[in-house]
Amino acid sequence: VWWEFTAPFPGGVSQPVAANGILFLPAGNYLYAIGAGYIGSNGFETTKQEETQKKESEPSKLPEQKLSEKELADKTITPESQPKIQPDKKQIPTRQLPVEITNNAKAPLKSRITIHYKDEIGEYDQSTAVNGKGDITIYDKDNVEVIFESEGHVPKKVIVNKSDSKLEVVLDQIQPGKAVVVDNIHFDFDKWYIRKDSINILDKLVDMMKANPHLKVEVWGHTDSIGDDAYNQKLSEKRADAVCDYIIKHGISPERISSKGFGETKPIASNETKEGRQKNRRTEFYFKT
């Protein structure tokens, strides 16, 4: 609900006013009313009479922070920062997908599975567990993100499409002195900033390091052979630094993680094909002894 705002109104210019559990905030020529309703999981309800005058802010390029209701209550909310509405997951069609999770020796692994899907309406998440082999309920869409975790192993992210009829996933064991490729840590062309679609797998890697407090890791960055050698070397270093910085900012001691760039010097596939170059543009975790 909106009211014309003038200086004599209780609270004065630019001062919030509270009444009957409702917080009134001045915004231009209006008062913005925030009530303790329920929308999605954010815990606030907001209304405005004249929708035509609303200005939408640019979408954030940073990963959205998940806040508790108490934390939300401490935040100042303006018309340009309305809470995100979580869509009804029942609206998204699902299907059953057979999965098999093993280690490098082909032994079955009990795995925690996180499923994430995002469209123009919102984001959808669910989780489950499989003991080596079984069916999971997955969104019947393309570009569904599925992350597998198992104790003592490196998490793995897989992108599932509607055409996929089965998943066979091999999780690498955490072994000192061994380097493991971490798939799906993406960077834009010629950039080294962490993309939002890499956040979930990085968060799982943080969880892995928290669950193994004595583990030390060196992040290795690699590029393909397109471009100048010296430039690729610098780019690989910056990308490895970006991954390292993200992990440190999320609670891992700098003494436990470092970074190193190799440029184009350690290819694992041919640089003559698009597929090969994509494999060579990679991030590895080297587990120190």
Image (cartoon, helix red, strand yellow):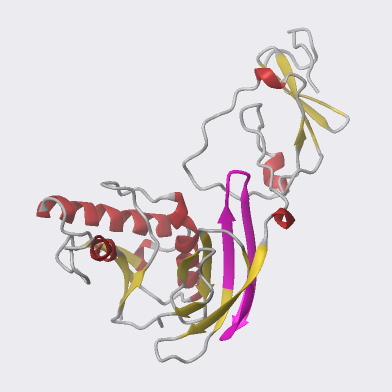
Residue 89 in the image: x percent, y percent?
Answer: 70, 56
In the displayed structure, does residue 134 sit left or right of residue 245? right
Q: Is residue 239 above or below residue 166?
A: above
Q: Residue at x 74, y 57 (%)?
A: 90
Inspect the magenta stretch and tell me whether residue 118 lies in it. yes
Q: Toward the viewer: 21 or 221? A: 221
Check the picture and name the quadrant holding the N terminus.
top right
Inspect the magenta stretch and tell me whether residue 40 lies in it. no
In the rendered structure, which segment of residues is drawn in magenta?
113-136
Judged from this view, the residue extending furthest toward the left is 229
Q: Residue at x 71, y 45 (%)?
A: 42
Residue 166 in the image: x percent, y percent?
Answer: 52, 76
Q: Toward the viewer: 133 or 209? A: 133
Check the picture and name the quadrant holding the C terminus.
bottom left
Q: Residue at x 14, y 65 (%)?
A: 265
Q: Toward the viewer: 47 or 33? A: 47
Residue 279 in the image: x percent, y percent?
Answer: 28, 66
> Residue 283, located in which quarter of the rendered image?
bottom left
In the displayed structure, does residue 25 sit left or right of residue 186? right
Count of numbered badges drawn on the protein: 0
Judged from this view, the residue extending furthest toward the front is 163
Q: Is residue 252 above or below residue 131?
A: above
Helix, strand or loop: magenta stretch: strand
Q: Toward the viewer: 133 or 223? A: 133
Q: Residue at x 51, y 63 (%)?
A: 161
In the displayed structure, does residue 224 sit left or right of residue 23? left
